[in-house]
Structure formats: C-alpha cells, structure tokens
Amino acid sequence: MGSDGYAPAVRVVLFTGKGGVGKTTLASATAARLARSGRKTLVVSTDPAHSLGDALEAELDDEPRELGGEARGLFAAHIDTRVLLGGAWGRLQGHLRVLLAGAGVDDLVADELTVLPGVEELLALTEVRRLAETGPWEVVVVDCGPTAETLRLLGLPEALSSYLERLFPAHRRAVRGLLAGLAGKREATESAARFDRAIDALDGLAEQLAGLRALLADPGRTSIRLVLTPERVVAAETRRMLTAFALHGLRVDGLVANRIVPDPPPSLRGPAARWLRERHAEQQTVLAELVELCDGGPTLRTADYAAAEPTGVRALLELARSVYGDDDPVAAGHPAPPVLGVRRTAGEGTALDSEFELAVRLPGAERGPVELARIGDELAITIGLTRRMVDLPSVLRRCTVESARLQGAGTHAELRVVFRPDPTVWMR
C-alpha cells in the first residue's frame, strides 16, 4: 500500500517477437528477475505453443501457482482459451442469438453471425486483464504469440467495440416497443425480459472491451517489449511493428536483441573464425541501425548467444542479469509522447482562412508508404497491413484534408495532416 492507503496499479509487460527469436525465454527471465527483487510477479502465456512451462521447467495449467524454491514470489500459468470459450462466451453467444432472432434472422445465419473473429485471442487478453486486476501481483509479464498475431490481438478490443456498436446499437426503448407490438401482452413481457438480459450481457462485454482498451493504451501501466535477432529481415519487421503499435496507441518501451555473436580474438583462425567475424560484423551493423531507430524512444538491450537454451530459474536469472545489469526490468524509461496532437497553424477564431494540423506519431514510418482516407468523421490511416480509424476532433470534422506529409525519422517520425475549414459546414 502507498502512503495514501491505495495499492499501486499493477504493471503489465507484454513480450512479443518473430517466431523463434527467444521471446518466451526472455519473458521468463524478466519475470524471474522481478520475483527475485521482491516483487510478486505473474508470468502467463497467451501463445498457443505454450512453451512457457518448458522455459521454467515447470508443469503449468490455467491456474496461477507459485513455483517456489529459487522462484519464490514467481507465479506462472498458461491461459486455456478452450475453457474460456465454453464459459462466459458461450452464455453471451446465446444472448446474441436472442437479439438476432428478435430481428428476424434465421437460426443458422444467427449462429454464423455470433462467431466473432479473433474471439479466442480476445478471451485470452480479457483473462490477462482479470488476473492483473484481481490478483495480488505487482507485475504481470505476458508471453504473447508472434508479432503479427500480437498486433491483431491488441487491436481487437477497439475493433470489436466498433463492431458491436454497429451491429447492436443501443436502442433499447425502440426495440422493446417493436417487440410489444408484435405479440400479446404476456409474450411481449417475456420477449422484453429476454431482450433486456441480452442487452445487459452486451453492455457487460462493451464494458470489458473498454476496460481492456484502457489498460492496453495506458503507458503508465502497460508496455510492449519486442524481442528480435539482429538480422536485416527481422530488424525491418521490428521497424514496421514499432510503427503499427504506435498507430494503435500502444507503447513499446523496449527492444531486446537476442543471440549476439561475440567477436572472436585475432588469434583465432580458420573457417569458423571467419564465419564468426562476418556474423559479428553483420550483427553490429544491424545493431547500429537499431540504436539510431531507438534514439529518444525504446530502450535497446542485448543478450549474448548462449551455447544452450537457458531453461530453469537459475539459468533464467543469469540471463536476466546479463540483459538488465543492475537496472530495474520495468523501469519507466522515456515518457511516451501522445500519439495524436492538433494545433492551429493559421487564422483566428472562426475565420475561413484558418488552418489546422493533425500530428500522428508513427516511429519508424519515415520510409512509408502511408495511405489516408476520410470516412465521415473519421480518418482511416493505413500503413502496410495495419489500418486504424481515428476519430477526428470536433473542429476537424468541419474541415477538409488539404495535404499530408511524413517528417522526422526513427522514433521522431510523424504524419502531419493539414485541414482547412469546409465553407459549407464551418459555421453551422
């Protein structure tokens, strides 16, 4: 408890990276280090591969349990989405079918409509939030799936909130009146009661999604660590992921370059020594690019190539020591600047010659391409395969897009979009 009597908010750190780069090992090592420092720590896996137990050399299931011994204070679990699918989600599906049936949708079609895309991943993330907010943990470390899957997963709460609002807008009174007009008094009362239960379930889901989004988008509580190996292809994907996470308003506070090959001594000769020197030189070139990319942004750390995969708490603690040194693994680091900002660049008051600039922080995006589309009161921003609908501030909704440009580099890259008043709606 703090001096004001309130418990500090739990810290959530999500580890992700391209498959096979060692994210599970580094997530486990970080969690072990945190527990050793005296903080009650939970490490969980949302990765269907479930290799967390292998890294910790422990038998895990969906219930968090303390590992004990050298890992005192460290709790671990695998999240089993099959159990979650058969529980609360199954009940919610039933309520959704009630709504669709009331709208005259055929049962078979209703079954298809209630299978929401990505629901298993969403349930896993919801379970992470539940564990974080109801358990005794100070830190929750999450071993996520590969980066592309993680990006889709972390964008689901916002996407599904929009989906639910479009599919089931909150018009309770109107629908209750419709149901009453289609049946007798008793039938109408029963139909209205079923509808109310369904709406209550949807409201509960909407609240969960809003809470999940708030947790993920809070840079003071949640951050992402990208694990990579220093190879050009992987580094290029890391740059794209930095941009994509920022576009979704999610903070990446650290990169870990894993499996760094040492520079062999000059006395070493032969084909093996030549390969080591070439590999070392290539990695150092990529690391220099990553240092430039992270300037003023995420902390870049490295982990040396080990002769054997570190497994078990003792080996993981040794790995964590080499990565973090004496630093706190969840130190705040650089404050995250706001993703969106609006400023007036010309004119005053309601003058038609006013000009406004929307700045969107997109680290790593200086190489483009970026696509924009105005859709009603939203601006669709597309970078590669990532797209986000940005709600425009009220002043920009009465404006038209005049131009757009990318400026800056690395973590300082920004998209600048210029707006000018639309005379047909500006003064309305």
Image (spheres, grey):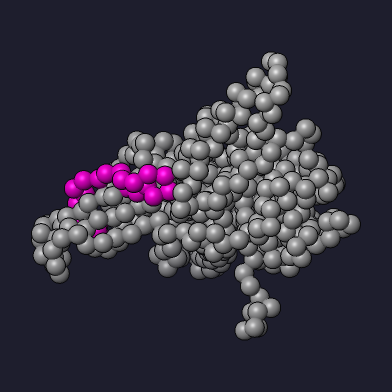
Residue 285 rendering spot, x and y as whole percentages: 52, 32
Which residue appears at 50% of the width and 43% of the height?
A: 291
Q: Residue at x 57, y 40 (%)?
A: 147
* Quadrant housing residue 23: top right
| Residue 227 percent coordinates (x, y) | 61, 42
**In this rendering, would 311 be left or right of 24?**
right
Residue at 47% x, 59% y is: 336
Location of the C terminus (image quadrant):
bottom left
Q: Is residue 282 magenta?
A: no
Nearest the eye: 343 or 182: 343
Q: Quadrant of residue 333?
A: bottom right
Q: Kindly identify the residue that appears in the image at 54 percent across and 64 percent down.
A: 220
Q: Nearer the viewer, residue 86 or 172?
A: 86
- Left/right placement of residue 381 relative to residue 262 reads left
Above or below, 307 relative to 207: above
User: Can residue 80 be seen in this snapshot?
Assistant: no
Placement of the N terminus among the 4 image quadrants: bottom right
Residue at far top of view: 271
Whether 411 is among the magenta residues is yes
Magenta region, residue range: 396-415
Using the image, determine if residue 213 lies above or below residue 363: below
**Left or right of 213 on screen, residue 137:** right
The spot of residue 344 in percent (x, y) is: 22, 62
Q: Position of residue 146 (x, y in %)?
A: 61, 38
Residue furthest to the bottom in view is 4
Q: Is residue 367 visible?
A: yes
The residue furthest right is 69
Q: How many marks?
A: 0
